[in-house]
Image (cartoon, helix red, strand yellow):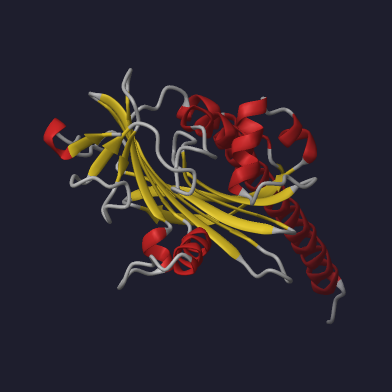
Amino acid sequence: MQTRAPAVIAAASLSLALALTACGNDAAEEESTTEEAAEETSAEELLANLDSATDGIDNYTLEIESVALDPDLGDTSVKLEYLIMDDPAGAQMTAVMPSMGEFILDMLALSGSAPEGLTGEDLGTSTAIILEDQDVLLADPHGFQGSDTPWVRGETPEEAVDPTEDFDITAIIPAIGAFSGIEDVEEVGSEEIHGVETTVIEGVLTSEGIGALGEAEGETLANLVGGVLLDSMDAKLWLDADGFPMRIEFADAGSEGVMEFSDIGSTSFEIPSEDEITDL
């Protein structure tokens, strides 16, 4: 004799299975949502730690490259390298500004004194050393200062490229702190920078974040992006486990650039001896 019981049981079992599956999906969705929230919190926590992670840092290498984008005049690039050491306290700064070098080369050519074998990049490269309570030392590899030593100390001609002029070394780290306030934060991956594991985060530095900077920090950040701060800029940060920014990329409508740290705690440079310096 046939019976409907198996069909009823089967239907009930199917309903239960569907219900359990639905519950399972809800649980999976809830777990996924929780994981996403944790990831977002993690990125925000790293950003919140950026200021404290950079506070007091006194030994590092920082390389900066920025490009001002101008459809009429062409792109202008600047490369900077900062070697900061703590014992003894000092900074060695190298600036590479090819466009400035080309300008100097043209001026020298007009006067008939253009040096042979030197390029605009050669003339647009300048290195300075600042030591605590001492005058700035400026490298003179081509002898333009009339010295027979590789370094000079004292007043230099106006046309000399001075890497200390536009970038206040004491304001760079506080200026970087502005990126801790980026909005629309998104964690986009991980990457190793100079042997350090980092979390990669993207976001937008808004006009409010820029406006919160002090005068010196604002000027420093403006110089990094070609001299003018627009309303906002896109930012991408590589933060280590403590929130330290091993690398930062930034861009707005008129410029783009990158900053990258290395040799943290192990940076050093050679200080010239007195017989390598000419006083001007």
* Residue name at image x 45 percent, y 48 percent: 161
Q: Looking at the image, can residue 184 be seen? A: no
Q: Nearer the viewer, residue 230 or 278?
A: 278
Q: Residue furthest bottom?
A: 1
Q: Nearer the viewer, residue 49 or 119?
A: 119
The answer to whether residue 71 is left or right of residue 41 is right
Residue 219 in view in this figure: yes
Please tell me whether residue 39 is drawn above or below residue 66 in the rendered image: above
**From the image, which quarter does the C terminus lie in?**
top left
In this rendering, the answer to whether 59 lies above or below 2 is above
Q: Which of the pair 45/98 is nearer the observer? A: 98
Residue at 20% across, 34% down: 271
- Rendered residue at 50%/63% (across/down): 107
Q: Give the residue furthest to the front.
A: 111
Hey, which quadrant is residue 278 in on the image?
top left
Position of residue 8 measured from the top left corner of the image (x, y, whole percent): 85, 68
**58 with respect to 277 (left or right):** right
Q: Position of residue 15 (x, y in %)?
A: 82, 63
Q: Nearer the viewer, residue 133 or 175?
A: 133
Q: Quadrant of the N terminus?
A: bottom right
**Left-right relation of 198 to 145:** right
Q: Is residue 270 toward the left or the right of residue 252 in the image?
A: left
Residue 11 in the image, given as x and y percentages of width and height: 83, 69
In the image, residue 202 above or below residue 241: below
Q: Quadrant of residue 74?
A: bottom right
Query: Total of numbered circles in the picture?
Result: 0
